[in-house]
């Protein structure tokens, strides 16, 4: 027995002695994978994902033993370059979307050039730390080569035998770790829509390989999953087909014109916010008092951000799980607000002063039912802010087009998409330079009693406040014109924020817990401390949603919890249109029983916010008692609608040519 142990020990020592290049590849790659998790989800070591990454690094590295030691460097260096790209891309991507990149998003690379400033603004040196590892590997290789190491170990090389040992070891390690995983974990792996959870449990390499498989799956087998998706769809619709509403808002806007105002990055955080007695969004604040204001309205955008909100609002479907609906599934058939109104004789149109190709709108907007798309070429780019035409000029020029549309059409429906408040929220000379400093009195300094602390100056949040103030001012000019115009007497306007500005916990925490008197942050022991945690941040992602008209305003606040997916059923009921395949609900029918599902599997009700990645939740009210059955039913509903909606999108289930298969 002692002899066997000695022999095993000798074999292990000899393996490291004669395979220094392979071992350095494994060590550097494993460290790289750990850093990817650290710089994204903040988890450097989680034992299951750590050993699964190790197992896959060993298995992939084993194929290098088909080459002689002198030739192995190219193979291992190529693998390390791939891991480096995975690290850089995912770390940058995570800073934008709090999620991980997908192969299905390759089609959206052309968008990067359009938002170059926004991408550049997110760059940090730590996102490129992975470049160090291939460099270290090169140095190790050169050092070994200088000592004639590879010619020496070639005498002892047993490539195929070593390959079998490593493959066996890697597979055994994967099986052992797999036995520690729950069925729920593997279910989430197969669904792929909770990417943070997959990386945390299975590792970055497993995630990326699984993502590649899911991306190629529909291409390899065009009908893959169709029957399953169709059955899920039919089963769901049998029990949950959207009802045709009958409440006090039914048909109140029937045959009226309707214009949606898509307000870029306008968050409810801004509502009634004052800095030094200056309202940041005075015009939107006024709209909340003059119109039907939904104060708990949440976007449900995924990686498609603004385009996802457009998609979900117009279709009452969730964003696509793989890729982006606007980019990857623009050729599908959808039942939408514009298409149903077009059937009723409405002229439908959209306006956005950016390039028509941005988010593939030139192809997707016709699929949504818009007859015309007034893009960048329809406007005189006479005043630029950020990514393009200023909101002030956009609204001014849009009004001329709108008046012409009203003159030529009995009924119309349109969407105006703003641009100036887009990230990176850079300060601009056209902005009103509102005072963002804090002023305090120091009684001991009689000569200069006022102390000034510019704690917001130069920060991303400070720049966002100035951007938003400008966007609100431009919107105010538009509203003022509407009120005084002889046009638009039979028109309702629907204003909505497309998504929050996506600031980090740290950036908001620096705002909520900053003590301007000392220049320091409050700590948990301080009476003024505000516990701005993950859940507070998620609840802070809501945006304004307001229905307003100049002649017949309904000044009422609606505090039911509502998602973008509920807009179509709610507004559709008001306009006299109905989509029986809507996944969302008329908020005036479901009221406080609504469940807002998010693409990552999280959900929100008026009672609780649920974190799907950690399988934990936080009650909205500490006085609320929540049963396991309540959480379980909400989670089951969330999972179901995410899967049903994705099946509709991916397999084109609403296509009239496939309707014979739908019950």
Image (spheres, helix red, strand yellow):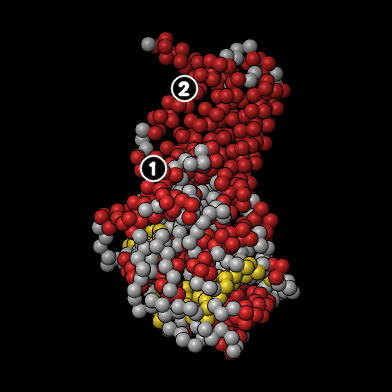
x and y percentages locating residue 581 in the rendered image: 41, 60
Mark 1 vs mark 2: give the one in front. Answer: 1
Please state if 348 lies on the left or on the right of 623 as rendered. right
Quadrant of res 112: bottom right
How crowded pointer 2 is (Cα within 10 Å; few <14, some 14-19, many 20+) is rated as: some
In this view of the protein, can residue 426 be seen by the observer?
no
Question: Helix or strand or loop: what does disc 2 sit on?
Answer: helix
In this rendering, the answer to whether 598 lies above or below 104 is below
x and y percentages locating residue 183 in the rendered image: 35, 40
Q: Total number of numbered labels?
A: 2
Which residue is found at the position 52% from the left and 78% from the top? 257
Please state if 454 lies on the left or on the right of 341 as rendered. right
Which residue is found at the position 50% from the left and 83% from the top? 549
How crowded pointer 1 is (Cα within 10 Å; few <14, some 14-19, many 20+) is rated as: few
From the image, tell me which residue sits under label 2: 168
In this view of the protein, can residue 264 be seen by the observer?
yes
Question: Helix or strand or loop: what does disc 1 sit on?
Answer: helix
From the image, tell me which residue sits under label 1: 187
Please state if 60 lies on the left or on the right of 555 as rendered. right
Gap in Å between the C-alphas at discs 1 and 2?
26 Å
Nearer the observer, 536 or 518: 536
In this rendering, the answer to whether 207 lies above or below 516 is above
Quadrant of res 442: bottom right
Which residue is found at the position 59% from the left and 70% from the top? 349
Which residue is found at the position 54% from the left and 37% from the top? 220
């Amino acid at each position: 027995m002692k002899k066997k142990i000695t022999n095993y020990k000798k074999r292990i020592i000899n393996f490291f002695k004669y395979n220094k290049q392979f071992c350095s590849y494994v060590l550097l790659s494993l460290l790289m994978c750990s850093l990817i998790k650290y710089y994204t989800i903040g988890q450097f070591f989680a034992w299951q994902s750590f050993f699964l990454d190790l197992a896959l690094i060993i298995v992939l590295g084993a194929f290098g033993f088909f080459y002689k030691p002198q030739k192995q460097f190219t193979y291992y260096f190529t693998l390390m370059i791939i891991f480096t790209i995975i690290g850089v891309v995912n770390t940058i991507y995570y800073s934008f979307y709090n999620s991980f990149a997908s192969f299905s998003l390759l089609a959206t690379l052309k968008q990067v050039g359009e938002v170059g400033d926004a991408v550049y603004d997110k760059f940090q040196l730590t996102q490129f730390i992975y470049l160090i590892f291939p460099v270290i590997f090169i140095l190790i290789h050169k050092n070994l080569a200088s000592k004639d190491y590879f010619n020496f170990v070639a005498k002892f090389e047993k490539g195929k035998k070593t390959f079998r040992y490593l493959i066996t070891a890697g597979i055994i390690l994967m099986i052992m770790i797999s036995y520690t995983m729950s069925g729920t974990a593997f279910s989430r792996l197969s669904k792929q829509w909770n990417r943070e959870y997959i990386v945390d449990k299975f590792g970055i390499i497993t995630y990326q390989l699984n993502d590649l498989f899911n991306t190629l799956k529909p291409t390899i087998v065009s009908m893959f999953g169709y029957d399953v998706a169709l059955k899920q769809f039919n089963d769901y619709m049998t029990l949950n087909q959207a009802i045709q509403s009958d409440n006090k808002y039914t048909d109140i806007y029937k045959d009226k014109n309707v214009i949606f105002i898509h307000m870029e990055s306008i968050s409810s955080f801004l509502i009634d916010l004052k800095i030094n007695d200056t309202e940041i969004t005075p015009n939107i604040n006024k709209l909340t008092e003059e119109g039907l204001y939904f104060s708990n309205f949440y976007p449900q955008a995924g990686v498609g951000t603004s385009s996802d909100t457009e998609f979900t609002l117009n279709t009452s479907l969730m964003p696509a799980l793989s890729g982006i609906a606007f980019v990857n599934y623009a050729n599908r058939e959808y039942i939408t607000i514009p298409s149903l109104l077009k059937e009723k004789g409405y002229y439908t149109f959209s306006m956005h002063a950016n390039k028509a190709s941005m988010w593939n709108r030139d192809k997707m907007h016709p699929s949504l039912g818009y007859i015309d798309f007034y893009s960048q070429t329809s406007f005189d780019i006479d005043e630029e802010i950020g990514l393009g035409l200023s909101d002030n000029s956009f609204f001014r020029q849009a009004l001329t087009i709108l008046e012409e549309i009203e003159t030529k059409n009995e009924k119309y429906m349109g969407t105006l998409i703003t641009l100036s408040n887009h990230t990176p929220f850079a300060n601009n000379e056209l902005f009103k330079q509102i005072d963002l400093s804090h002023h305090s009195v120091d009684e001991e300094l009689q000569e200069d009693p006022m102390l000034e602390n510019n704690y917001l100056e130069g920060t991303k949040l400070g720049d966002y406040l100035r951007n938003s103030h400008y966007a609100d001012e431009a919107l105010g000019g538009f509203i003022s014109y509407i009120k005084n115009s002889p046009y638009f007497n039979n028109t309702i306007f629907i204003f909505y924020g497309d998504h929050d500005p996506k600031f980090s916990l740290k950036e908001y925490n620096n705002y909520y817990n900053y003590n301007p008197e000392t220049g320091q942050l409050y700590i948990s022991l301080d009476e003024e401390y505000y516990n701005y945690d993950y859940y507070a941040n998620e609840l802070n992602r809501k945006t304004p949603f307001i229905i307003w008209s100049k002649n017949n305003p309904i000044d009422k606040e609606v505090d039911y919890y509502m998602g973008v997916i509920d807009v179509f059923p709610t507004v559709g009921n008001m306009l006299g249109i109905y989509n029986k395949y809507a996944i969302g609900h008329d908020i005036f029918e479901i009221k406080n029983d609504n469940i807002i599902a998010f693409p990552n599997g999280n959900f929100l009700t008026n009672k609780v916010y649920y974190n799907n990645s950690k399988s934990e939740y936080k009650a909205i009210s500490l006085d609320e008692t929540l049963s396991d059955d309540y959480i379980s039913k909400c989670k089951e509903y969330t999972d179901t609608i995410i899967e049903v909606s994705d099946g509709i999108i991916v397999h084109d289930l609403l296509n009239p040519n496939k309707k014979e298969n739908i019950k």
